[in-house]
């Protein structure tokens, strides 16, 4: 699970702590449930373990059950890693990327583009014609840009995602 770059990226973005979060999650998956057990097993300070656990909890990737010790009256939190939620987040991310890719492909296929040779700004036909085919930034003439390579690249990327 942790060898997948996309999963690593999701966990790192949630916790802002790639080094400790992976150790903590691995420990949880091996059956350690309390923050104290996790801290002891990973040799990570307890406050860091708790910070990572709460970030995972806020994202829905970890859950806990709280119980009260009858003798000490202290609360104990037993944590669980919600592996299913990670895959749901990953699916949502791929769906969003796929949608953006489709929108980009449609935009490229349905438009004609002109580019400024001096600064590289790119305009669609409507924008270029409104400015008499001159760059709005520097006033240089705009040249037609063949976007067939961009369209091919987007189609190839879409195919790889499927």
Image (cartoon, rainbow, N blue to C red):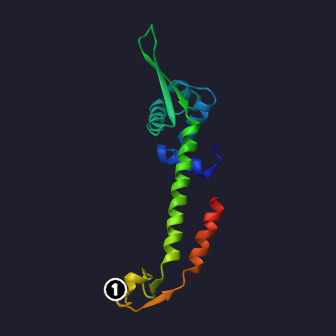
- The quarter in which the C terminus is drawn is bottom right
- The quarter in which the N terminus is drawn is top right
- Residue 16 in view (yes/no): no
Q: Residue at x 46, y 90 (%)?
A: 143
Residue 161 left/right relative to 112: right
Residue tagged by mark 1? Answer: 130
Q: Residue at x 64, y 49 (%)?
A: 4
Dot 1: few (<14), some (14–19), or many (≥20) neighbours within 10 Å? Answer: few
- Residue 95 in view (yes/no): yes
Report helix, strand or loop for mark 1.
helix
Residue 100 on image: x %, y %: 50, 62
Q: Residue furthest front?
A: 110
Residue 67 on image: x %, y %: 46, 17
Between residue 134 and residue 78, name the one nearer to us. 134
Query: Is residue 40 positioned above or below 88 on the image?
Result: above
Residue 87 left/right relative to 71: right
Q: Residue at x 48, y 45 (%)?
A: 14
Q: Residue at x 61, y 74 (%)?
A: 152
Q: How many marks?
A: 1
Query: Is residue 82 positioned above or below 161 on the image?
Result: above
Residue 139 on image: x %, y %: 34, 90
């Amino acid at each position: 699970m942790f060898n997948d770059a996309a999963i690593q990226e999701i966990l790192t973005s949630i916790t802002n702590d790639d080094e400790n979060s992976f150790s903590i999650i691995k420990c949880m998956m091996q059956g350690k449930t309390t923050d104290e057990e996790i801290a002891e097993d990973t040799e990570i300070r307890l406050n860091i373990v708790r910070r990572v656990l709460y970030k995972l909890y806020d994202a829905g990737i970890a859950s806990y059950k709280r119980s009260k010790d009858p003798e000490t009256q202290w609360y104990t939190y037993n944590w669980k890693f919600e592996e299913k939620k990670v895959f749901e987040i990953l699916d949502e991310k791929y769906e969003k990327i796929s949608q953006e890719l489709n929108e980009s492909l449609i935009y490229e296929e349905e438009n004609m583009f002109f580019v400024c040779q001096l600064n590289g700004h790119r305009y669609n036909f409507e924008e270029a014609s409104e400015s008499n085919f001159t760059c709005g930034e520097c006033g240089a003439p705009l040249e037609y840009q063949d976007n067939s390579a961009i369209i091919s690249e987007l189609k190839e990327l879409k195919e790889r995602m499927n």
